[in-house]
Amino acid sequence: MNTTAFLSRAASSLAAIAIATALAAPAIAAEAAENEAVLEEGTIVVTARKSSENILKTPVTVTAVTAETLDIKGITTMQNLAASTPGININDNASGRADRGFQQIVLRGFASATPNSTTTSLFIDGVPIASPSAFTAISSPERIEILKGPQSAFYGRNTFAGAINVVNKIPGNDFSGSVSSMAGTFNNVRLHGDVEGALVKDVLKLRLTGDYFRRDGSWVNSADGQRLGNQSTISGTALAVFQPTSGLTVKAFAMASRDKDGPTATGRITITDVRNGAGQVLIPGSANCSFTGDTRGVLGANGQSLGVPVTNPYICGTVSRPSVAPSGNYTNDAITKAFLALPDNRLIAPEDGTQGYGLLRQFRHYHLSADVDLTDSLTFTALAGWNREEVTTMIDLDGFDSSSIRVGQASAAVIPPSAPRGFYDFPFLVERLNMDNSIEGRLAYTSDRLRGVVGVSYLNAKTRAAQRGTTALLTAALTQPPGGTAQNKTLGAFFGLTYDMADGLSFSAEGRYQVDRLYLFNGATTINITVPDLIAVGSYAPSSLLASRTFKNFTPRLIVNYDINPDTMVYASWAKGVNPSQFNAAILNQPAAVQTAAAQAGVGLAVEPEKITNWELGLKGRAMNGALRYTVAAFYAQWRNQINTVTIAVPTLPTPTLTGGFQNSGSVDVKGLEADLLWRANDLVTFELAGAFTDTNIKAFKSVPLSQLTGIFNFAGKEMPFTSKWSTNVAVQFGHALGSGDARWFWRTDWSYRSGFWSGHANTTRTAGRNVVNTRLGVTLGDYTIEGFVTNLFNDTKINSLTDNTLFDPVGQPFGVRNNAALFYNLPDKRTAGIQVRVKF
């Protein structure tokens, strides 16, 4: 189906729905007035356009998940939120690891290529969080707003596909709060407490929350029997609201969290058997197809390959489960402790990082806001925020139990005689430090027909990364210094104007002019550049500026919306967005052979910003006197200058080097249809139905490793990886009073479906679709609530993330590794049951 036909059919469908709704208006108006009062009480207000608006009157595709919905669904993490929201995937799989240190929010098929950047940004009360992985836990907010489509005009950088804004609950005057406790299978424990009240009535109010969570993994390491997937989180928040006068409100918010996880349930599916020196099969090969690949994967000026054909076996079709149980060498013994205790070239001090295999992340967020009513129609708002995230992750890079591959069974280059355990083992440490601060000031104006906002914003973000790993005994000489600091300073000026042209007809014009200045600084040691492909040859002192770039962009959005009747609105919008550039900083600290290999793979020092043009049609409203609420939207987007990742294995000594980078190598068209419906059939039962169709069409793409594997140079017509084309969530909720008192009961069941997605751009392998059913039954007696729940009721254990990856085979491969010869997977949590008790006071 071409784009014109898609938009035409979408518009026709929306028009048909709109006409049917308009015809029903007289019947709606005839409903009882008392039901109208109930409707108004249930109105959801969002701040998608920097001002408070009724969600059904906001001409933007936005989903609001209220505090009540979060509670009744048991949503406590970003993964929970994404699983219950069609059109969103969470990809936690990258570079041979899959953990909470990497969280890629894939909204509408827009998958970012790097953990340090994202196409969907996170905000708390409108204050940005630059790191996409920093915010994983959710602690009793007022609501969460999921804005779909480019939001660059109002929210700036990294809102290429959308934005997620967590809105805090404002404390009241009365002293109140709640405590809850959950216990479940796999040693699940969750404790929550919140308290609020006025220190000075109507002037100074405070709200505090605290959460503790831990669980054992639901999978077992076949090597030693330890649990895989252990997680624990401690978090706390504090919100103070100061209102000395009716026209001034100041809010101060602080959040701190600490995630400590064990090894994850991950592994590789390989194209060939991985054996030890005695010939025992450790991982059976799963190849079921082959490609006529190319030894170079590069086209010459004449459009012909510069390499020669080669037959490459691979894994094609749908992969539901791994061929063997996950395993790994995750022993936290004296050798592991010595590896982690070595202070040389550490980014994060050893005592502040993980003390064994797994993840340790510490996150801090602070923000301050002030709203000043200058006149009855003019308000000034100021925001300031600060974030810091420290992540250390220790993984077994080879990803399987290699303890039977002893020293001497492979070349000394692969298994050095100094291997500390006497067998092949590849411990690998990843460190990342993200820091950012931001300020924003804006004026909002409201009159009878004209509403507007104008403002300026500034963001200063820094990131550094480091990694180390070896199959030999780790010494200071084998460590690489941390990469330099990548910094971006972003200055933006934005506006938004809405004019009511006639009764029910409004036009909005929005825009942001943004200047991104990117800087790359050297690390703590002098580096000598001998390969001229990235920066000028020469010696660079510690902390010196290596490179800088400046990008200037204007991102507009135009919206027309029309109220067919007081309960039905239709809208159309056109928008442009920009996703910032970034540096390939880590390559500069690598040996000359690695820099040369990166340049040959098309990896330069910096990439150009990604760009998007988006068209959208939407319909939203209510019927049956508010018992039925619905939103429908169709969109078409052109994604250009797409940034993609490339992984390179370089046969260096004494240990092969795995490196990678980013390049502008893609162009994609994306179209889709989204719908969300809620129907309160009666006092007993409520139905919810949400669904999304997301169709991605690659127009251009380049990848030297994939062309080497498949022989494909023209990827046009392929689909984007990590994106479910079909997703839906269906819920049925029963609830009613028990007797004549304040006792109530409820029973809610959610069914979530995600179709399978491709593991890479070549579309060779995909996951199977997953069906996850969660159910929850509870009774409330005044201030006391007890609930029983089961998640993943039917125990769907199919792979939930999959990506093309590197084969580790110390015996069968000359240098122990082979590019694009394996699939790296992550497994979901198994069925979990539990009981939760909550007390309000």
Image (cartoon, helix red, strand yellow):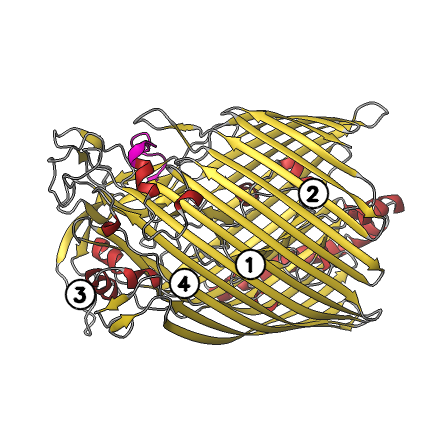
Is 473 positioned to the left or the right of 231 in the image? left
Q: How many marks?
A: 4
| Quarter where residue 377 is shown | bottom right
Nearer the camera: disc 4 or disc 1? 4
Label 3 crowd bin: few (<14), some (14–19), many (20+), radius 10 Å: some
Q: Work out how far the residue at label 2 is from the one at label 3, CA to CA, in angstroms.
A: 63 Å
The prevailing secondary structure element of the residues shown in magenta is loop
Residue 227 coordinates in the image, percent (x, y): 40, 28
Q: Which residue is mark 1?
A: 162
Query: 103 above or below 224?
Result: below
Q: Work out how far the residue at label 4 is from the one at label 1, CA to CA, in angstroms.
A: 27 Å
Magenta span contains residue 605: no
Query: Which disc is residue 485 wearing?
Result: 4
Q: Work out how far the residue at label 1 is from the one at label 3, CA to CA, in angstroms.
A: 39 Å
Q: Which residue is mark 2?
A: 208
Q: Work out how far the residue at label 3 is from the one at label 4, CA to CA, in angstroms.
A: 38 Å
Q: Which residue is mark 3?
A: 305
